[in-house]
Amino acid sequence: MKKQVKISNAVIKRLPRYRRYLKELHKKGVDKISSNEFSRLIGYTASQIRQDLNNFGGFGQQGYGYSVDGLYKEISAILGLDRKYKMVIMGAGNLGQAIANHTYYYKTGFVVDSIFEVNPRLIGIKINDIEVRDYEDLVEYVEENEIDIGVICTTKEVAQEVADKLCFAGVKGIWNFAPVDIEIPSHVAVENVHLSDGLHSLAYHINRNQEEAKTK
Amino acid sequence: MKKQVKISNAVIKRLPRYRRYLKELHKKGVDKISSNEFSRLIGYTASQIRQDLNNFGGFGQQGYGYSVDGLYKEISAILGLDRKYKMVIMGAGNLGQAIANHTYYYKTGFVVDSIFEVNPRLIGIKINDIEVRDYEDLVEYVEENEIDIGVICTTKEVAQEVADKLCFAGVKGIWNFAPVDIEIPSHVAVENVHLSDGLHSLAYHINRNQEEAKTK
DNA sequence: TAGATTGTTAATCGATTAACAATC
DNA sequence: TAGATTGTTAATCGATTAACAATC
């Protein structure tokens, strides 16, 4: 990696997408790709692809292109996907259970360690072989087991309080599914998902398309 | 609404967030808010708030500010949240079931009508009182019941095929949770969620924070 | 070497912010 | 009316695209 200037968030947000496409190419047995071919596939300009990648280093080779597997590994390393992350899920409701049941994340190194709940009926049971523990024990558990990420699947009413406790316990990142914006100290990373926001902008586009159809 | 020039996607993506904050304010009994007060709360500049809103019309009043409830209703109308949307979920796996069990969307007018599956063991059962139907019957069902949105909760391998069938059947929008980018005709709206992309950029920020902590 | 394609600088475009006149 | 705050134009900033020299 070269000199780390400030890399814009727009670039970071594109990296997982690059990685996804490279993985598919690798699976199909493609060894090398030029920024131009990649552009046609992924839908960003060739210029942007080269610009983005050169924020992190010169991964290509002039006159040849980029090694698919090589670039895949570089991007994985940049994102930090060459290590494991221990996660705890906060809340054993529908969403919490759905995430606990998802084995997809496990493949990229995100392991659900435990689920935390306040409902005594759920404490002690297992969901997809993952133990549901008492919310009261959170801080101690996170510290002792070096948990990296807290996944908030609670109601919006308690989400901030739960986030505070997670930060106090020492998690490094929060993946928030509650429909509020969590405020946390700057040394903790946060990703607010806001599923319904996406649904609402989808609604906007549906109605715009229908208006356009009428006009024609 | 005033002359509809081209409104950038960045603006549209902010609307649901404005709406969320306005809803909270209304709940707290706040009647009016100035762009400055709103700025402090929501974290956008006052200038941006006024600029964004004026894409759609002059909702404020000089010397006074914006009516919280009035603006909430305006934004809801712009997004198209003053009507109902019928959705079908494609795939009765973990994610499909989780979405079926979520009553949250229902409140803003997004109603899950049915779930479609290929697995004969699941066809005919009910999940949260929603019937699981045969994928074979999709096209006919969507046409007859005027379904608006298809929610893709399948594997990435079949997602495009399912999307094609949904489009053929005449849905107006697709909410895609499969980790591929769906290609559809431009008259159909699409929202690709890509949950794991968010998790991957979270990993990036976690590692950046830890590097910074070391430097200090 | 000639051809291809990157890495990088320069130009353009679009989105955000600042300023201020209009007006409640 | 005076004060406040919007609506809107102008200035700035940052991100994307174009161009081309470097180099494999």
Image (tube, coloured by chain):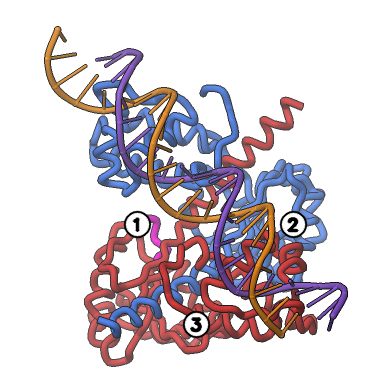
Chain colours: A red, B blue, C purple, D orange
Task: State which quadrant residue B162 falls in.
Answer: bottom right
The residue beneath circle 3 is A1
Q: Residue at x 52, y 71 (%)?
A: A55
Residue A5 image point, x, y percent: 42, 70
Which residue does the numbered mark 2 point to in the structure image? B183
Task: From the image, tell me which residue sits under label 1.
Answer: A181
Asked whether B184 falls inside the magenta stretch, the response is no
| A56 or B10, nearer to the observer | A56
Q: Is residue B129 above or below residue A35?
A: above
Identify the chain of the residue marked 1, using the numbered disc in the image.
A
Q: Which residues are magenta?
A: A176-181
Q: Amino acid at mark 3?
A: Met
Name the residue: 36% across, 65% down: A154
Mark 2, other Cα within 10 Å: few <14 / some 14–19 / many ≥20: few
Question: Residue A177: horizontal and vertical position, in percent?
Answer: 42, 63
* Residue A1 rendering spot, x and y as whole percentages: 50, 82
Q: Which of the image's four quarters has the C terminus of chain B?
A: bottom left
